[in-house]
Image (spheres, helix red, strand yellow):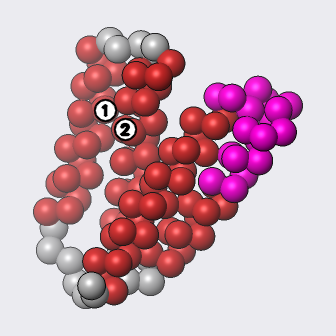
Amino acid sequence: MGPQAFSWLLLGASIAAEVAGTIALRHADGFTRLTPSLVVGVCYAAAIWLMSIAVRHLEVGLAYAVWAGSGTALTAVLGILWFGESTTLPRLAGVAMIVIGVVVLNLEPHQP
């Protein structure tokens, strides 16, 4: 596996860590509960660390756009599925637009 492919895997792990940290925020109760609060901190630190390694071989703007967009869309979907959050048409359309934006960004040719 080449360094760029490995960087995409690291970026995926970074996204997963960021989403896990964001979901843990729901349970941290304003950082008054120790275990969920520690999970938030560890997950966010891991997300940034993994991202810092991934951008060694990926364009920073593209990597951040994929990270932010994917994390936002995934967090919104998990909020709908796990917490029964609103599933209005505008909200679902917004998630779809985020996903489409991430796909379009990846259609551009990349320089190694």
Task: Tell me what residue is drawn at x 29 percent, y 41 percent.
Answer: 98
**Residue 2 placement: quadrant:** bottom left
Q: CA distance from mark 2 to mark 1?
A: 5 Å
**Residue 73 placement: quadrant:** top left
Task: Tell me what residue is drawn at x 51 percent, y 45 percent.
Answer: 19
Q: Is residue 61 visible?
A: no
Q: Position of residue 46 (x, y in %)?
A: 61, 63
Q: The disc labelled 1 sits on which kind of residue?
A: Val
Q: Position of residue 43 (x, y in %)?
A: 63, 54
Task: Tell me what residue is drawn at x 50 percent, y 68 percent.
Answer: 51
Q: Nearer the viewer, residue 81 or 60?
A: 81
Q: Is residue 16 visible?
A: yes
Q: Which residue is mark 2?
A: 73
Q: Nearer the viewer, residue 87 or 84?
A: 84
The answer to whether residue 41 is magenta is yes
Judge from the rendering whether residue 46 lies leftward or rightward of residue 1; answer left or right: right
Q: Position of residue 48 (x, y in %)?
A: 59, 64
Q: Position of residue 54 (x, y in %)?
A: 44, 75
Circle 1 packing at 10 Å, graded few (<14), some (14-19), many (20+), is many
Magenta highlight: main SS: helix
The answer to whether residue 40 is magenta is yes
Q: Contact, CB < 8 Å: mark 2 with mark 1?
A: yes
Task: Tell me what residue is drawn at x 54 percent, y 50 percent.
Answer: 18
Q: Which residues are magenta?
A: 26-43
Q: Which residue is mark 1?
A: 95
Q: Secondary structure at mark 2?
A: helix
> In which quadrant will I find the C terminus?
bottom left
Residue 18: numbered disc: none
